[in-house]
Image: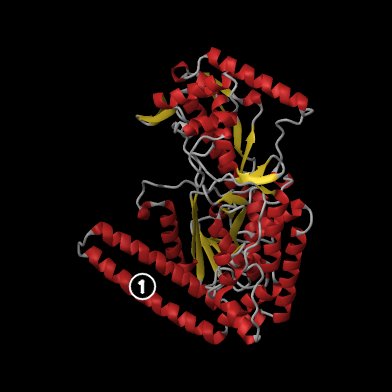
Amino acid sequence: MVAVIYARKSTEQHATADELKSVARQIENARAFAAAKGWKVPEAHVYIDEAISGAETKKLVNRQRLLDLIDTGRAPFQVLVMRDASRFSRRDGDEAFAELKRIARAGIEIWFYQDGTRFEYGSFTANITGIVRAEMNAEYRRQIARFTKEAMVRKAQAGHVTGGSVFGYDNVRVNDHVERRINEAQAAIVRRIFALSAEGAGYTRIAKLLNTENAPTPTPKRGRPAGWSPSSVYEVLHRPLYRGHVIYNRTRRRDADGTTTFADRPESEWLRFDRPDLRIIDDDAWRIAHTRLESVRSYLSKVTGGRFGGRRRDSDSKYLLSGFTRCATCGGSFGVLDRRQYGCIAYHKRGTTVCRNALKLPIATLDEAVLRTLRADVLRPRAVLAIIDGVIAELAPSSLARDVHRQQQALLSVDREIAHLTNAIAQGGQLLPLLDGLKTRQAHRADLAALIASQEAVDLRRIDRAVVTRTVRACLDDWRSQLGSHVEHGRQALREILAGPLMLTPEGRGYAFEGEAVVGSLLLGRIGLPTNLARPAGFEPAAFGSGGQRSIQLSYGRVLRDWCARQGSNLRPTGSKPVALSN
C-alpha cells in the first residue's frame, strides 16, 4: 500500500534548525509509522502547511491540493497518515469530523500515528467520539486565542509595541520586548501635515506638496509606488497616537470559528492608555486641524444630501474596470476620475514626482475596447478548444510514456547529485554552499516526483471529446454573457478570467493595454484534467492586449499554429491590429 503524509504547524519557527521543527518531526514520525506498517511513502506525497492555523482552511493550500487529488478518484495512494486529527483541522467539531469523513468515504484510510488508531465513522460510538475529539481540538484553538489576547493586552498596558511600525516612530528592542521612540525627522513631517491642514489644505494638496518636497514617506505596500497619497495624509491626521493616546483592541481579527476576518469592535471594548512620551502633536494643534476638517465634512454632507463619505463594497462598484487596471508608467492604481474618465490615480492624487502619466480616457471607450478583445480573442471557442486538443494530444499514452521516462531519468540524475553532496558534507566540505546545493536539489527532486505522480494519474479514457466541447462552449458562453450584461456580473467574470491586473501604457492620445488570462487552467479542471500537469507551450496564462507584441496570437503559440495548419486555414485572431483608444 502507498501512504501520503500531511503535517501542519500553526506558528512558524524561524530560528529553529530544520531537523528540530515540528513539521520535520511529524514527517519523521509518520514515515516510521508507515514503515512499521509496510507502507511506501513517495516523496511527492508529503504535504506540509506551516505557520497557518488549522481553522484557516482557505490558506491551507497544500491540504487543499491533497483534497483535490482525492476528489479526482484517481489518487495514487490508499492511506493518509498524520499525527492526530488536529493537524488536519481545528474547525468546530462537526465541521472537522465531516472533513475526515469525506476522505474516508473516498476509500482512503486515515491513521493517526500518535496513538496508532484509525479514523472510524458510521457507528454511534465512533461518531460521538470523533465529534467530541474534534470539538476538543477546536476548544484548544479558542483557549490559545484567549491566552494570546491576554498577553497582548498586558503588552499594550506596559507600553510595548503590539503591532507593526508607525510613521513618526522607531521600533527599538529593549530586553525581551519592543518599544516606540519618536523619530524627529518623521515627526517634523507629521507636524507639518497638521499645520497645512489647519491652514486649509486638503488631503490631495498636502500629498502633492510633500511629494514635491521629497519629504520622508511611510513605507508603501508591496507593488505600490513610494510617496504620499491622500489616504496616507488622512491616516496621519486621524491617528490618536500622535497626541499621546494609545488605543488598543479597536478591531477584531478573527471570527468565532477562527477564520481571519477584520472588523471594528464596539467602542465600549476599546482599551485606552495615555503615553505623553509619545506625543508629537499638542492638543491645540490637534483641535485646530480637526475643527477645520469637521467644518468641511459638515459642508460636504449638506451639499450632497448626506451622501458624502459613504463607502461602496467592491461588488457594488458602478465601473467595470475599477480595481482591475494599473498604470504601467508608475505601477500605481488606474481608476475612475470625476465619474467620467479613467486615469492614473497616483498622478492626480500624488503629483508629477510620483507619476507623469496625465492622460485620461472616457470610461465607455476603455470598457468597450477591453470587452471587445476579451470576447473576440480570449473567449474564442475555436481557439480555446484548439489549445485543449493540443494538451490532450500531448498527454497521449505514447507521448506521456516518453515524458514519464524522461522525468524518471532526470529524477535518477538528481538522486545521484544529492548522494554526492551528502558524501561531500560527511567528508567535511564547505558546509554552507553544500547545504544550499543540497536544499535546491531536494526541492527539484520533490517537483519531479510530483510531476511524475500527476502524469501517471492521467486517464485519457475518461475524456470524452464531445463532452469537452459542450463544457468549454458552455463556460465560454457564460463568461461572454456576463461580460455583456450588468456591471456586477461583468466584474465577477473578470475575477475568474484575469490572472492579474491589466497594465495600461499611454501611447499618443490613447492607451495600449495588456494582461494575462487563466481561462485554460480553469477549463482544464472543469473537463476533468489535473491543472498541475506540465502543459505544452502556449498553454501558460495567455497574454492578450490591444495590439502589436501583445496580441493573443503570440500567447497561443505552437498549439494554435499547428491546429490552423491541420485545418488548412490562415486563421489570425482578431485584435492583432492596434485597437484605437483615442479620446
**Residue 564, image x, y percentages:** 63, 82
Tell which residue pokes out farthest to the top in this image: 284
**Residue 439, image x, y percentages:** 35, 61
Image quarter for residue 581?
bottom right
Q: Nearer the viewer, residue 373 or 158?
A: 373
Tag 1: Cα neighbours inside 10 Å, few (<14), some, or many (≥20)? some
**Left or right: 154 as drawn, with respect to 362:** left
Residue 541 makes an appearance in the image: no
**Left or right: 437 as drawn, with respect to 60:** left
Identify the residue at image location x=72%, y=44%: 340
**Residue 421, image x, y percentages:** 28, 67
Identify the residue at image location x=75%, y=69%: 474
Q: Is residue 14 above or below residue 564?
A: above
Q: Is residue 333 above or below residue 208?
A: below
SS under mark 1: helix
Q: Nearer the viewer, residue 345 or 259?
A: 345
**Left or right: 169 as drawn, with respect to 305:** left
Residue type of the residue flagged with mark 1 = Val
Q: Which residue is mark 1?
A: 414
Image quarter for residue 569?
bottom right
**Residue 360, image x, y percentages:** 64, 46
Q: Nearer the viewer, residue 313 or 227?
A: 227
